[in-house]
Image: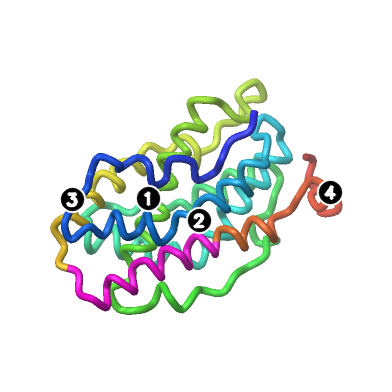
Amino acid sequence: MRISAMQHAVGGGRAARTSPDMLALLRERTGPSHERLDAAFGSLVLDRRADLIRFLSAHAIGLAPLQAVFRRFVEEELGLAAPDYLDMLRDDLHRLGMKSAALPTLATPPEIAASGSAAGVGYVIAGSRLGLAVIRRQGYWGEQQGFRSRYMEDDSGPACWKALLPWLREHAFTALDCEAVPAAALASFDTFARAFAVSPAEESLKEMGVDG
């Protein structure tokens, strides 16, 4: 089974065309980055244990520098309780024999700290949960082995996306926002791409003593 990690991250809101159309701007600016990330994660076969570990590891590496900004945006702008995806991922990896502390770390991209940029981070992370819903329906390693991923099975993600769409419609964006928000989204996609590149492949898992 081949599946893209970020599949449908943008497509889930295609019916919501708004003015000022930040959603359309985000799609236009991030489309190529989104496609490259899809291709990278799409190389994984998630009914293989080693590939599932790499998938979850890459998400943990990528989320670590973005989670704080995402949490503040969800809580302060969308008015929702922010899901703790890192906690879910660390628990999943621990149960799979992988120590999250052993994973590489990435620096926080400066673009996500710019004033008014947090919506770009929210767009990428909230959108990615739509793709995970597809993965959950198609299945992944663990069902026959008694493992269910907290990260995969979490149902809170779509609520963030559904809240984000009207927020993008109703929010008054400045000219600076129209640069800062897409820049933060691009930096978020790039962070996940770098996370995938440094995430442990099957050979590395064996060297780390993890059964793939």
Q: According to the image, what is the colour scheme of the structure?
A: rainbow
Cα distance between the residues tagged 2 and 3: 25 Å
Residue 207, how many percent across, how many down? 86, 53
- Check disc 2 and give the amino acid type: Pro
Residue 162, how many percent across, how many down? 25, 44
- Check disc 4 and give the amino acid type: Glu
| Residue linked to disc 4 | 203
| Earlier-in-chain disc, 1 versus 2 | 2
- Check disc 3 and give the amino acid type: Pro
Residue located 69% across and 56% down the image: 199
Front tag of 1 and 2: 2
Front tag of 2 and 4: 2
Disc 4 + disc 1, Cβ < 8 Å = no
Disc 3 + disc 1, Cβ < 8 Å = no
Residue 29, how many percent across, how many down? 40, 61
Magenta residues?
173-191
| Residue linked to disc 2 | 32
| In the rendered image, the vertical position of residue 24 relative to residue 6, given as above or below | below
Structural crowding at the residue carrying mark 2, measured as other residues with C-alpha within 10 Å and reported as few (<14), some (14–19) or many (≥20): few
Structural crowding at the residue carrying mark 4, measured as other residues with C-alpha within 10 Å and reported as few (<14), some (14–19) or many (≥20): few
| Residue linked to disc 1 | 126
Q: Secondary structure at mark 2?
A: helix
Residue located 36% across and 63% down the image: 120
Cα distance between the residues tagged 4 and 1: 31 Å
| Earlier-in-chain disc, 2 versus 4 | 2
Q: Secondary structure at mark 3?
A: helix
| Earlier-in-chain disc, 4 versus 1 | 1
| Residue linked to disc 3 | 166
Looking at the image, which is closer to me, 129 or 207? Answer: 129
Disc 1 + disc 2, Cβ < 8 Å = no
Residue located 37% across and 66% down the image: 182
